[in-house]
Structure formats: C-alpha cells, structure tokens
Image (spheres, grey):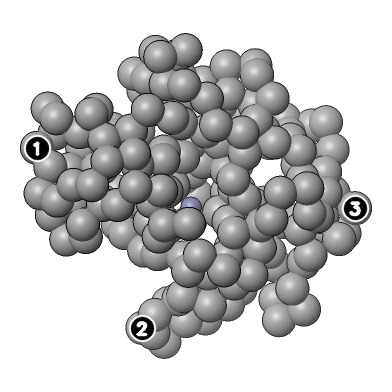
Amino acid sequence: MGKIICIGRNYADHAKELGNETPKEPVIFMKPDSAILQKGMPFFIPSFSQNIQYECELIVRINRLGKRIEPQFAHKYYKEIGLGIDFTARDVQTRLKEQRLPWEIAKGFDGSAVIGKWFNKKEFNLNDLAFTLHKNETLVQQGNTKDMIFNLDHLISHISQYFTLKIGDIIYTGTPAGVGKVEVNDVLTGHINNQLAFEIKCK
Ligand code: ZN
C-alpha cells in the first residue's frame, strides 16, 4: 500500500462552513498507511475525540511513478477513481490548529481512511461527476467535481512538485459542504453517479 495524500479546502462551500479562506494553492496533508480501514470492517469511533466527523471525498489511485508532472500529462498517472471517507477528529484538529501545531493525530488515526470500490475512470465524465453520502439513509453530502477549486489533474501536478508519486498512492481530493458528526450505529453509504461505492457501519 502506498502513501495517502489528502487535499483540504478544495470546495469553496466547505471552506466557508469551517470558517476557512478559499486557498490560492491546494492544502496538502498526509495519512499513514495504518489509517486505512480494512475491507469489511466497521469504523470504531476512537475514545480520544468527542466529535468524529465524516468527510466524503473522491479518491484517485496512482498507477505510474511520476515526479513534477505537468497538468496536461497528469491524466496518464491514474486509471481508477473511487469514493472514500476522510474521518476527522474535529475537536482535536480545532485544538491543534489553535495551538498552531500539526494536526496529524486528528486526521491520521487508525481507520480514518475509508477506501470504497474502485471504478475505471472511463466510466465517468471527470469534469462533471456527482457523488453523495447518506447517513442512515438521509442525504448529508452532495458533491460534484465541477465545483472543485483545483481539478484532479491540477492536484496531481501540484502534489508531484513536492512528493514523488508511486504506484498505489491514493489521493483524497477534498470534501464538499455537509460534514458532520458520527455516532455509534450510524451507517454511512457513498455513491458515485448513483453507483454504490461503500457502506460503513460505525461502532
Ligand atoms: Zn478531507
């Protein structure tokens, strides 16, 4: 399994809901590979936080080694896309941000990276691709790639200026508005273009 690179504030409506400015360049952070929620496992809400929130995001799997990739060639570095959840300990993150400390533990804890089913990108129009998250059958998040501040190719190009991208690396491309808290027994269901990508039970 490769590294997990996440983008923050890639949708203006979500940046606004957390009181953040719209960024001039992508905000990047990482999760360790131990953050990946193993297939078929429930998500166990960790006891160190009182406010674990879901962030449903389009994800991309890198299938070719690359560094300093030009945006016009970025499409050659991935074949599959999917949907995931970037679970966030919001209370921990807020506290660390206020103290101007790194917020790794709020984002990179065990199970915090949900990876759904992979789809061939050719199935979709990547410039106008809708995805949704339902919590207990209620629609809570609705996104579309056309509302991204930085598109997939721009993100791959930008990330690869700093980090060599390797086969198997996964990029979380940011979340739209509607993030919220999870409780024990919540069921989170993600769809891309009305196709089921994941169903996760919280424990
Ligand atoms: Zn996120």
Residue labelled with disc 3: 185
> Contact, CB < 8 Å: mark 1 with mark 2?
no
Q: Residue 162, percent across and down? A: 16, 61
Residue at figure coordinates x 34%, y 47% from the top left: 167
Q: CA distance from mark 3 to mark 2?
A: 34 Å
Q: Amino acid at mark 2?
A: Arg
Residue highlighted by disc 2: 100
State the residue at coordinates (84%, 38%): 136
Question: Which labelled disc corresponds to residue 70?
Answer: 1
Q: CA distance from mark 1 to mark 2?
A: 33 Å
| Residue 11 shows up from this direction | no
Residue in the picture at 57% in, 16% down: 193
Count of numbered badges drawn on the protein: 3
In the rendered view, does 80 fall on the left or right side of 78?
Answer: right
Q: Is residue 24 left or right of residue 36?
A: left
Which residue is at the front of the view, 70 or 98?
70
Q: What amino acid does circle 1 point to?
A: Glu
Q: Is residue 132 left or right of residue 42?
A: left
Residues at marks 3 and 1, CA–CA distance in whole angstroms: 44 Å
Mark 2 surroundings within 10 Å by alpha-carbon count, few (fewer than 14), some (14 through 19), many (20 or more): few
Asked which secondary structure carries label 2, the reply is: loop
Percent position (x, y) of residue 92?
Answer: 58, 77
